Image (cartoon, rainbow, N blue to C red):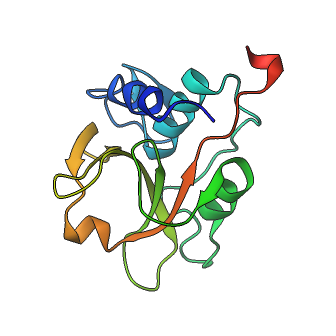
């Protein structure tokens, strides 16, 4: 597993990148998945698969948890208290699919996370009550593969 401080530093390096749906290019544009993909490339190496096109609703009308399923396939699910470097998955509305990702930057009373937010780009936000209540899963990045070193 990459050092958690390296994950947070990589994510903070994306702050200010404009929001662009389906993009994953530091400084040019990304969405929340693009941010996680970009951090993956920086701390783990080559991405394991080519990401297919996806809609902004993340299959919400069909009720399919595609983002959660993909996260569970490529990241390691974590239980217990959040720690810096965790990838967090949000359900934005009760009864809807999980469709937003962020990376924990700080924990505790001043908890913060980094995410790409429509209309704002990549920002670091307080992990306040309204955000924290929406977290449905936490993950960590996997070990870097030997072929990517």
Residue at the spot 55% in from the left edge and 62% down from the top edge:
58
Tell me if 60 is positioned left or right of 128 in this view: right
Residue at the extreme bottom of the image, as rendered: 95
Residue at the extreme right of the image, as rendered: 147
Asked where in the image residue 42 lies, by quadrant, the reply is: top right
Q: Is residue 133 above or below residue 71?
A: below
Asked where in the image residue 43 lies, by quadrant, the reply is: top right
- Give the image location of residue 72, x and y in percent: 68, 58
Q: Is residue 141 above or below residue 54?
A: above
Q: Is residue 109 above or below residue 17?
A: below
Return the residue nearer the eye: 107 or 46: 107
Residue at the extreme top of the image, as rendered: 149
Tell me if 42 is positioned left or right of 90 in this view: right
Residue at the spot 27% in from the left edge and 65% down from the top edge:
131
Return the residue nearer the eye: 101 or 57: 101
Residue at the spot 31% in from the left edge and 30% down from the top edge:
18
- Give the image location of residue 60, x and y in percent: 54, 73
Asked where in the image residue 27 lies, by quadrant, the reply is: top left
Q: Quadrant of the N terminus?
A: top right
- How many marks the image carries: the answer is 0
- Give the image location of residue 120, x and y in percent: 23, 41
Q: Quadrant of the C terminus?
A: top right
Tell me if 70 is positioned left or right of 90 in this view: right
């Amino acid at each position: 597993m990459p050092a958690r401080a390296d994950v947070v530093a990589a994510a903070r390096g994306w702050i200010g990148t404009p929001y662009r749906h389906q993009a994953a290019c530091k400084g040019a544009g990304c969405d929340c998945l693009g941010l996680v993909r970009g951090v993956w490339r920086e701390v783990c190496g080559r991405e394991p698969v080519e990401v297919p096109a996806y809609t902004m609703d993340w299959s919400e009308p069909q009720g399919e948890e595609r983002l959660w399923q993909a996260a569970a396939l490529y990241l390691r699910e974590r239980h217990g208290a959040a720690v810096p470097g965790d990838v967090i998955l949000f359900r934005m509305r009760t009864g809807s699919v999980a469709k937003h990702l962020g990376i924990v930057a700080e924990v505790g009373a001043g908890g913060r996370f980094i995410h790409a937010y429509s209309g704002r780009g990549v920002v670091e936000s307080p992990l306040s009550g309204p955000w924290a209540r929406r977290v449905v899963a936490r993950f960590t990045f996997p070990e870097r593969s030997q072929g990517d070193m």
